[in-house]
Image (spheres, rainbow, N blue to C red):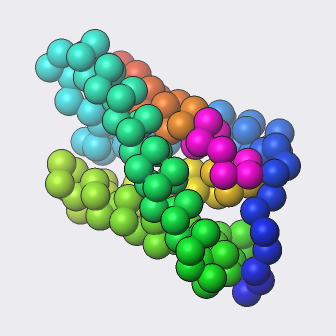
């Protein structure tokens, strides 16, 4: 366990490529397993996914995680590049998804949230990287759900 100040270095190119290449097949798998998005009105759903992505990142990364990093000394303690603040925020993020997702799908949100939190911290606590990633993940799930419709 280490305590380090937030980094302001850009996200590594390999990280961006890994997210870009891994997301579509994972979204397709999630949609095939029945964890896609409901598409009764596809364009309305896409709009809601965009708004939800932005709102969730403002609340969880810009609010909860930022507060834990700044006000809780142990929040900056990290384990394999995952801070305690990121871990707690990600658990809260996954629990928040229980209101409209089955438990297994909400649990599947946990590693994605850890990734979003890591991107937030790695970028110097800027909201743009996790928002863009969240939008990409949700768009991939939307497209996969639409393709399997």
Magenta region: 123-130
Which residue occupies 56% across, 79% down?
Answer: 72
Which residue occupies 17% across, 54% down?
Answer: 99
Query: Is residue 49 among what the camera can see?
Result: yes
Query: Is residue 137 among what the camera can see?
Result: no
Does the magenta run of residues contain 124? yes
Is residue 99 toward the left or the right of residue 26 in the image?
Answer: left
Q: Is residue 64 above or below residue 83?
A: above
- Quadrant location, the C terminus: top left
Does the magenta run of residues contain 127? yes
- Quadrant location, the N terminus: bottom right
- The residue closer to the viewer here, 86 or 74, is 74
Seen from this angle, which residue lies furthest front? 71
- The residue closer to the viewer here, 132 or 32, is 132
Residue 36 place in picture, x, y as percent: 30, 36
Is residue 129 toward the left or the right of residue 89 in the image?
Answer: right
Which residue occupies 45% across, 61% down?
Answer: 64
Res. 30 image quadrant:
top left
Residue 32 place in picture, x, y as percent: 32, 38
- The residue closer to the viewer here, 122 or 26, is 122
Res. 80 image quadrant:
bottom right
Decide whether the magenta segment is chiefly helix, strand or loop. loop
Residue 123 place in picture, x, y as percent: 73, 48
Q: Is residue 27 above or below residue 4?
A: above
């Amino acid at each position: 366990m280490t305590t380090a100040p937030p980094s302001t270095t850009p996200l590594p190119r390999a990280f961006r490529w890994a997210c870009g290449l891994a997301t579509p097949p994972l979204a397709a798998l999630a949609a095939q397993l029945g964890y896609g998005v409901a598409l009764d009105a596809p364009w309305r759903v896409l709009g809601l996914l965009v708004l939800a992505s932005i709102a969730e990142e403002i609340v969880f990364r810009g609010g909860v995680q930022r507060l834990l990093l700044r006000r809780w000394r142990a929040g900056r303690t990290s384990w394999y590049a995952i801070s305690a603040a990121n871990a707690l925020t990600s658990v809260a993020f996954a629990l928040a998804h229980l209101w409209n997702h089955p438990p297994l799908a909400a649990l599947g949100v946990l590693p994605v949230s850890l990734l979003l939190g890591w991107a937030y911290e790695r970028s110097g606590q800027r909201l743009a990287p996790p928002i863009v990633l969240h939008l990409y993940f949700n768009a991939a799930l939307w497209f996969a759900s639409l393709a399997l419709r």
